[in-house]
């Protein structure tokens, strides 16, 4: 696997080795041994969602002690995946990085604890999978406004085509955010 560093410490793009022939392709989507070069993490939960074009999910995180690292990938379709650094004191605090993940490029995005996470569906539909190193705890949920002008994220979906959950319509702006991550 190839590990591509981003401008945010700990956030990386992973490109697996894909073996293809006339029958199709094969790749290891996760190997604990190989992933150890990225982070020493025990994943405890796998999640999957299916969404249609224009859906934006995020920017979500879980507060400590239930914070989650995530390893995300797309198995059908195409998304723009976004990580926002919310670790107070980090040199990249308040900055974001994005990666296009698709069934065709097989890329994965690793986000350590202390990132707000979201994605936008760029294809007709997408199936999104991710591993977490901590179990989901609803009382620890946190989020930032997906359309915060200070974060200036280009979701690559026209604003009039964005589809949000009711909950994702009402998250705070970054300027009003008090980070639980030191």
Image: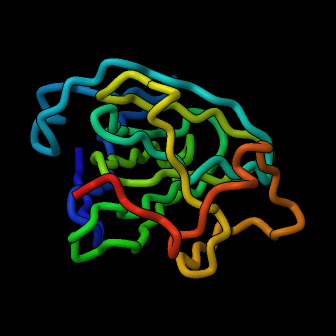
Q: Is residue 172 above or below residue 1?
A: below
Total marks placed: 0
Q: Is residue 42 above or below residue 63?
A: above
Q: Is residue 111 above or below residue 147?
A: above
Near-viewer residue (144 or 26)? 144
Residue 79 position in % (x across, y down): 61, 51
Residue at (18% x, 25% y) in the render: 32
Residue at (59% x, 69% y) in the render: 173
Near-viewer residue (90 or 170)? 170
| Residue 71 quadrant | top left
Residue at (57% x, 25% y) in the render: 48
| Residue 153 quadrant | bottom right
How was this image coloured? rainbow
Q: Is residue 170 above or below residue 177?
A: above
Direction from residue 126 to residue 32 in the image, left or right: left
Direction from residue 55 to residue 18 in the image, left or right: left
Residue 22 visible at all: no
Residue 42 position in % (x across, y down): 20, 24
Q: Quadrant of the C terminus?
A: bottom left
Q: Quadrant of the N terminus?
A: top left
Near-viewer residue (171 or 112)? 171
Near-viewer residue (129 or 159)? 159
Residue at (81% x, 70% y) in the render: 158
Residue 12 position in % (x across, y down): 29, 56
Residue 67 position in % (x across, y down): 33, 38
Residue 178 visible at all: yes
Direction from residue 84 to residue 134 in the image, left or right: left
């Amino acid at each position: 696997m190839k590990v591509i560093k981003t401008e945010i410490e700990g956030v990386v793009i992973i490109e697996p080795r894909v073996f293809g022939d006339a029958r199709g392709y094969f790749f290891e989507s996760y190997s604990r041994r190989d992933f150890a070069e990225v982070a020493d993490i025990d994943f405890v939960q796998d999640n999957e969602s299916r969404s249609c074009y224009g859906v934006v999910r995020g920017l979500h995180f879980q507060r400590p002690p239930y914070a989650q690292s995530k390893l995300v990938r797309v198995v059908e379709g195409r998304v723009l995946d976004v990580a926002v650094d919310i670790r107070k004191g980090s040199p990249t605090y308040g900055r974001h990085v994005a990666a296009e993940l698709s069934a065709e490029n097989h890329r994965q995005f690793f986000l350590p604890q202390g990132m707000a996470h979201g994605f936008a569906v760029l294809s007709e539909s997408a199936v999104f999978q991710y591993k977490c190193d901590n179990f989901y705890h609803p009382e620890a949920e946190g989020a930032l406004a997906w359309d915060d002008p200070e974060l200036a994220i280009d979701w690559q979906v026209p604003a009039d085509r964005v589809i949000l959950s009711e909950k994702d319509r009402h998250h705070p702006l970054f300027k009003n955010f008090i980070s639980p991550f030191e």
